[in-house]
Image (tube, rainbow, N blue to C red):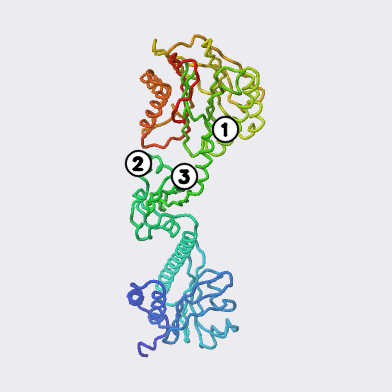
Amino acid sequence: MSPDEHLPLRELDEDAALRSILEGTATETGAEFFTALVEKLAKALNTEGAWVAEYVAESRRLRTLAAWMGGRFLSDYEYDILGTPCEQVIDEARLVHFRENLAEFFPDDPELKKIGAVSYMGVPLMDLDGKILGNLAVLDRRPMPKEPHGLAVFRIFAARAAAELQRLRAESEVRKSEEKYRRIVETAGEGFLLLDRNLNINDVNNAYCQMIGYTCDEIMGKRVTDLFTEEYRQIFITQKDRLQSKEYREFESTVVAKDGRHIPVLVHSNTLRDDKGAIIGNMAFVTDMTEQKKSLALAGEVQKSLLPQQGLRFDGLEVAGRSLSCEEIGGDYFDYLWGEGYSNHPFSVVVGDIAGHGVDAALLMTTARAFLRMRASQSGSISQIVNEMNHHLALDILDSGRFMTLFYLTVDTKSRNLRWVRAGHDPAIIYDPTHDRFEELKGEGLALGVDDKFSYEENQRTGLVEGQIIAVGTDGIWEARNKSGEMYGKARLQNILRRAANETAEGILTAVYGDITKFTRGMRIEDDITLVVIKVDEDSGKQSKIVEGRP
């Protein structure tokens, strides 16, 4: 018998077979690997045919990845495993060997009769969890030995085929995921950025390009901060460590379009990590806030128009106030209750702070202002006014978690006496430059809207004298932070009041706001900042006068 006529899987040189198959498949992957495998396997084992197939569990069918039969490749095909030897391989998840009389065992398999198959050997392809992926099989028109040689080779390449099939499936899943990601990103109405660890732009969608007027090629590779305004670039650099310490970030910024326009944006950003938890970059969705900011800016102008626009000089007093919102609209409030409509009361100043800021706080502030002005125009003590205001607000916001702090101060310009109600607000500060002494106008009182039955009481002080300064502010002043995280604090406020004591009320106000701006440089303010300054100055005369100044 010549070498070419020896029976399949008999007197097999396993080392030679292994070397032959390895040499034929070593450089191949994917479909080329499976094609090379079945040809080399059939030739090495001297069988009529060999095939590798992927199992489709839902339909219980096998789909060939490559098939070699009678010295040629077959086109890929799919077949039902019912009544075939492959059924046992799949269902029993083991090597199956029929050495002869194959057609008698599977009379309902027409392909076996057509081929004239006599013997068969198949092994399942399984993943690491034991899940069936498919099978690798050989058959022949001659009987196979009872104990066929080459089983080790057969199992080795079954494992290699299973690994390749898993790799292809993983690649397919990745492609599907990438395609899904790309569809989501490209059809998103908001901008998308993919950044590396150094915040360089690795990917960008059309929405972002259209937003700022650059092409994708012009944006790719830029550092994301290159597109910020100088102000926001400095803010971002200052807060970079704090922002990047969070897995999820939401913040506002302003980017510069190609035509120079400044575009306000809202950024939602996430940290990206690899399978070992190491940071590999960031992704961000960017929303154009231009229209929203226009609406908020209009609302902010309306809100500012409700605050006093100018300072006052009358009856030996100078009064100046200012409110700076951390957003377009805020929740701080100050007012002067004086003149026509308020003849039942001495000159009064109110400063309020709604919990939170933004639209909700602004709406509540407007409601509170309307009620306070209406009630203050009627007779009654300031404690009665505040008690009725508390009852009114509690009905509206008791279950919302909102509240309002308030400092209500009256100054009797004739007697130089002070009366005040403190409703959860920080005490007003009095500075006496003659004796270089600070004093707080304290008093008990719960924030408004917390308890509708709470009773507020008046406090009083006598002896207001020339040169003394009263400052009534909100906590946004002393809680403002610099880039080191340090609070501005009341001590700094007192130092500015001391240094600017010889200035007018408006001058003192400007000094305070200028120092806060200097202190917080490189940081966005996180809360509204409001301050009213009252200075006793007999030179102000007895006639009332409007003083020009910033609102």
Of residues 219 and 336, the one drawn nearer to the viewer in this rendering? 336
Asked if the residues shown at circle 2 and circle 1 are in contact, with their CB atoms under 8 angstroms apart, the answer is no
Of residues 353 and 185, the one drawn nearer to the viewer in this rendering? 353
Of the image marks 3 and 2, the number of the one nearer the N terminus: 2
Asked if the residues shown at circle 3 and circle 1 are in contact, with their CB atoms under 8 angstroms apart, the answer is no
Label 3 sits on what residue type? Answer: Glu
Q: Can residue 335 be seen in the rendering of this structure?
A: yes
Q: Can residue 197 be seen in the rendering of this structure?
A: no
Q: Which residue is mark 2?
A: 234
Q: Which SS class for mark 1?
A: helix
Q: Which residue is mark 3?
A: 250
Q: Which SS class for mark 2?
A: helix
Of the image marks 3 and 1, the number of the one nearer the N terminus: 3
Q: Which residue is mark 1?
A: 365
Asked if the residues shown at circle 3 and circle 2 are in contact, with their CB atoms under 8 angstroms apart, the answer is no
- What is the CA distance from the residue labelled 2 to the residue labelled 1? 32 Å
Question: Which residue is at 58% across, 82% downward?
Answer: 106
- Residue 134 picture location, percent across and down: 50, 71
Q: Which of the 4 image quarters holds residue 7? A: bottom left
User: How many numbered tags mark residues here?
Assistant: 3
Q: Residue furthest front?
A: 543
- Residue 528 picture location, percent across and down: 48, 32
Q: Determine crowd level at label 1: few under 14, some 14-19, many 20+ residues with C-alpha closer than 10 A.
A: many
- Residue 160 picture location, percent across and down: 41, 69
Q: Which of the 4 image quarters holds residue 431? A: top left
